[in-house]
Image (cartoon, helix red, strand yellow):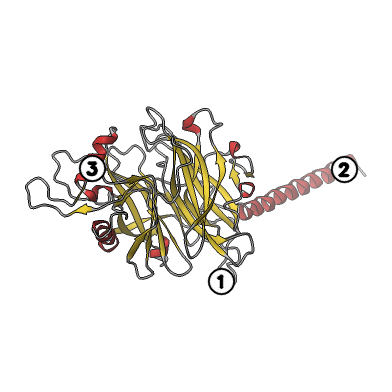
Amino acid sequence: MSAKERTERTSAAERHGTGFLLLLVLVIGAVLLTALPGDDDREGGAPCAPRKVGSWQADERTTGEFVRYGNDASRADDWTGGDGTHSVRLPDGRLLWLFSDTYLGQVHAPPNLSGQPHAWRDNTAPFVRNSAVVMSAGGSLERTLPAPLFANPSPQEWRWPVAAKVEPRSPGSDQKVVRVLLWTRATAGEPWIYGMPTATEVATLSLPGLRVESIVKVSDQTRVADPEKRVLYGTTAVDGQDTDRGTGTEGGDGYTYVFGGNDGKAAARPASNAYLARVPEGRLADPDGWQYWNGKNWTGDGRKARAVLGDGAAKGVGSAFTVVRDDGTWVLFTMAAGTEGLTTVTSYWACSPTGPWHGPAKGFAPPMPQDGAPKQDTAVYNPQAHPALEPNGGRLLLSYDVNWLDATPQVAHDQVSRNVELYRPRFVRLRLAPAD
């Protein structure tokens, strides 16, 4: 073979090899593009699309039911106002409403006097750190369970109930119980005027009697030296995504996803980050069943948890927020970060509970109660979803709490006693819509 022939064969082989490598790169690229989920596809092939609040309106019916019940003066040991509003549907159709700081006692009708147009509460009315109210399957509030339902762990600490879920007493059990997540806080000085976070606990309530059977600590935060970095879990709890979508069979991935947050700058809310844990069904009260998202995968060490949302500025959550699923999309509602006066609810969306979370979307300002005070200084906070009361896809019942915004507890106490509507949950009905 001549030198010229050898040169031509070598060039042809090189051209063939280059073409093969190029083809291989294109094939691998196509496989990767197919295998890696984008923002519009969630893991497992479930559909996911951007979501936002398309429309909303005040829900006078549910708001009015709490007004009716709270103003009923027939009993002296029942609920007349509270915040931290959460709910859970019981197997027999009843709804259990859970509240944090609560006023009991009686409410007085507004006197026909100038300057006092509202129903009011005496300054000596009993005040407890938590309560629970039972609603009938038909939607009527019926009774307050003995309050406080969850006793203080010590004279300097108290418990605030947050998300709750009905689950098997143990994995695979036919017997059902109610698990209630609790935030434990302790008395502290400035800037911790709402208490210093210390732990997340889980209470077990019997069914149908709703008796407290046990309380277990699942996350002890007292070893975290900086209180701003302590994370409390349970602001919302959501069942995992369906796994068998091809058959249309309802089911989950076997986990409950429990969201939590830190307090960030305690006196300048909202400045919190959102965190995420997951727990196998039936094991909410088992500390060994809890796993935490560390930014890459799940770990049993809560100290390695990393935020799934929050940059300390434009993006972030209030210390209490809520998450729902709309088809394949996860939607989070929170107070708008940086909003003066705490007036606006905004939302984020994601294709997975671990994110990435997109937003915030344009918010909306839910109505506040009318008040005749010379200086109206009220705040909206703690938006919470109640899917059991609005099960239709794309529609949602959202509660929000209202309080007098003042760093002096006695001033706030006097104002919410003067007008009882300033410390009760209010409700709006939302319709979710595609986002841009």
Q: Identify residue for label 2.
A: 6
**Label 3 secondary element:** loop
Task: For label 3, count other residues whose C-alpha is less than 10 Å away and answer few (under 14), some (14-19) or many (20+).
Answer: few
On the picture, is 197 further left or further right than 248? left
**Label 2 secondary element:** helix
229 over 215 or under it: above or below = above
Q: Amino acid at mark 3?
A: Asn
Quadrant of the rendered structure where residue 61 is? bottom left
Q: Are marks 2 and 1 in contact (CB under 8 Å)?
A: no
Q: Is residue 359 visible?
A: yes
Q: Are marks 3 and 2 in contact (CB under 8 Å)?
A: no
The one nearer the camera, 126 or 425, is 126
Q: Identify residue for label 3.
A: 123
Q: Amino acid at mark 2?
A: Arg
On the picture, is 189 further left or further right than 406? right
Q: Is residue 355 visible?
A: no
| Point 32% across, 49% down: residue | 82
Q: Position of residue 107 (x, y in %)?
A: 22, 53
Q: Identify residue for label 1.
A: 248
**First of labels 3, 2 by sequence position:** 2
Task: For label 2, count other residues whose C-alpha is less than 10 Å away and answer few (under 14), some (14-19) or many (20+).
Answer: few
Disc 1 to disc 3, C-alpha distance: 56 Å
Q: Position of residue 17 (x, y in %)?
A: 78, 47
